[in-house]
Image: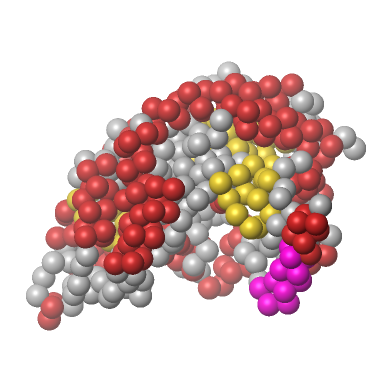
């Protein structure tokens, strides 16, 4: 009892100190007047633990980054070993084994034709790199008029200004519109809006018709189309069929427009294959990676590019064709070591294969939530499952956003030892790959209770 009391005191002190100096991401800080901060002491596997010894099942992989559990001994060991050898060095004019090895492995794993790896610091930075590469490519090959981008409605690509511009979630974007470049927005292939009896494939193919028209009209001024393959994560875990990607790849090729695949959230096994693009059998011109790249250990991102794009920048310096984008921590050796260890776990544990059984069980249990009165849909792509809540299931009328029903579920889940962080009124499960059936059972039970409590009035 004494240790628990000491832990609670320590947690309260940390929370108090935090609120005096720290500004947390994606948070209205005033909310912490009624929902106290949780001070974490440690993590193990799919669990986080606070100073009082209470555990929380990390059902969202700590913003989708953690793949093989907290404090994974193999990844932790690789990080510790690398830190004793070389912590960081300038990556201009120098190289090191962890970065070279990681580049080689990403090239081997990626869709065929992506041959060059450019490292950056985080997902938003990777999107910025890809946008600039595409824009700059067209200038270097004598097509300077291709300066615009096509994006999908309800898409999300990050918070820096370029990444924010090519996204379409108003909650994040609307306030900053005066600062953003103008983009062309195509309808989303989101299958939540399919007609009764319409298949995901037919709906996604039908929705592509608008994209085809936009490409026909604007190809001369468009540098690239950017999409989140298969799942629009921050847009409410809305999902679509791979057929859309295959149609898009063909159209971008015909119209001379780059295809940028933002696999930051959906890469590294989340959708059931190493990369979501594999399910459509396509190779994008540029592919952005981050989040799970290091298994949730350290910030790192990569943009994989085709040889054609790389070649457009390879020239005498005086031509001023070089890609001069840089980050101080580009190719950080410790982050690269974490990424290499993560890829080792994929290979040694046959993680993609093992995930099929885990995803099947998760989906089977989650579909039980369809029996709840205010659940409009339970949808799944690989290790991502989403539960859409509505005021009226017959009409799919949503709850007013200001009622914050999802926040009620979040609070209930925390009280019962589960970290769920709904996106609006969409409850989703995106757990680490080491989650077991008992943990999945706990997630579903607590989510069901939370949904009932949040929708009872």
For residue 299, which quarter of the picture?
A: bottom left
**In the image shown, does 270 or 135 lie closer to the viewer?**
270
Does any portion of residue 70 appear in the rendered image?
A: yes
Q: Whole-percent x and y of residue 391? A: 80, 36
Residue 222 left/right relative to 23: left
User: Is any part of residue 247 visible from this angle?
Assistant: no
The x, y position of residue 12, in whole percent, is 78, 65
Residue at the farthest right position: 457
State whether the magenta stretch is mostly helix, strand or loop.
helix
**Left or right: 435, with 256 as reference point:** right
The C terminus, quarter of image: top right
Between 60 and 376, the residue placed more toward the observer is 60
Q: Is residue 201 above or below residue 399?
A: above
Q: Give the range drawn in magenta.
A: 10-22
Q: How many numbered marks have been drawn onto this rendered protein structure?
A: 0
Extreme-left residue of the structure: 316
**Nearer to us in this view, 353 or 107:** 353
Q: Which residue is drawn at 79% across and 26% down?
A: 373
Residue 377 spot, x, y in % from top left: 66, 29
* x then y, percent, for residue 434: 50, 36
- The foreground one among 299 and 111 is 299
Task: Give me the residue at 66% from left, 73% from top.
Answer: 22
- Corner quadrant of residue 118: bottom left
- Residue plotted at (77% across, 61% down): 6
């Amino acid at each position: 009892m004494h240790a628990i009391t000491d832990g609670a005191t320590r947690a309260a002190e940390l929370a108090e100190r935090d609120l005096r100096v720290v500004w947390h991401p994606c948070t209205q800080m005033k909310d912490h007047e009624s929902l106290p901060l949780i001070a974490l002491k440690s993590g193990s596997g799919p669990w986080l633990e606070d100073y009082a010894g209470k555990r929380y099942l990390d059902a969202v992989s700590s913003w989708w980054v953690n793949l093989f559990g907290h404090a994974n001994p193999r990844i932790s060991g690789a990080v510790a070993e690398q830190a004793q050898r070389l912590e960081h060095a300038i990556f201009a004019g120098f190289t090191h084994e962890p970065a070279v090895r990681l580049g080689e492995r990403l090239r081997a794993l990626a869709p065929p034709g992506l041959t060059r790896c450019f490292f950056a610091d985080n997902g938003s930075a990777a999107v910025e790199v890809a946008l600039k590469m595409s824009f700059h490519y067209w200038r270097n090959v004598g097509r300077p008029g291709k300066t615009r981008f096509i994006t999908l409605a309800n898409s999300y690509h990050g918070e820096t200004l370029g990444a924010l511009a090519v996204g379409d979630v108003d909650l994040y974007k609307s306030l900053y519109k005066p600062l953003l470049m103008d983009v062309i927005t195509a309808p989303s292939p989101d299958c939540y809006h399919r007609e009764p009896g319409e298949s995901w494939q037919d709906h996604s193919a039908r929705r592509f018709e608008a994209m085809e028209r936009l490409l026909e009209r604007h190809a001369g001024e468009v540098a690239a189309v950017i999409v989140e393959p298969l799942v629009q994560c921050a847009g409410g875990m809305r999902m679509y069929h791979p057929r859309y990607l295959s149609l898009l790849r063909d159209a971008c090729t015909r119209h001379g427009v780059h295809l940028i695949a933002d696999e930051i959230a959906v890469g590294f096994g989340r959708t059931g294959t190493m990369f979501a693009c594999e399910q459509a059998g396509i190779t994008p011109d540029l592919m952005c990676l981050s989040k799970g790249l290091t298994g949730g250990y350290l910030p790192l991102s990569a943009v994989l590019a085709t040889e054609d794009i790389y070649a457009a920048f390879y020239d005498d310096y005086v031509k001023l064709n070089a890609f001069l984008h840089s980050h101080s921590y580009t190719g950080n050796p410790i982050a690269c070591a974490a990424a290499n260890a993560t890829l080792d776990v994929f290979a040694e544990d046959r993680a993609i294969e093992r995930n099929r059984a885990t995803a099947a069980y998760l989906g089977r249990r989650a579909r039980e939530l369809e029996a709840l009165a205010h659940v409009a849909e339970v949808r799944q792509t690989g290790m991502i499952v989403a539960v859409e809540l509505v005021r009226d299931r017959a009409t799919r009328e949503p709850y007013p956003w200001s009622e914050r029903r999802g926040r009620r579920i979040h609070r209930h889940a925390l009280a019962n030892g589960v970290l769920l962080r709904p996106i609006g009124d969409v409850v989703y499960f995106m757990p680490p790959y080491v989650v077991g059936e008992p943990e999945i059972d706990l997630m579903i039970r607590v989510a069901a209770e939370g949904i009932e409590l949040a929708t009872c009035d």
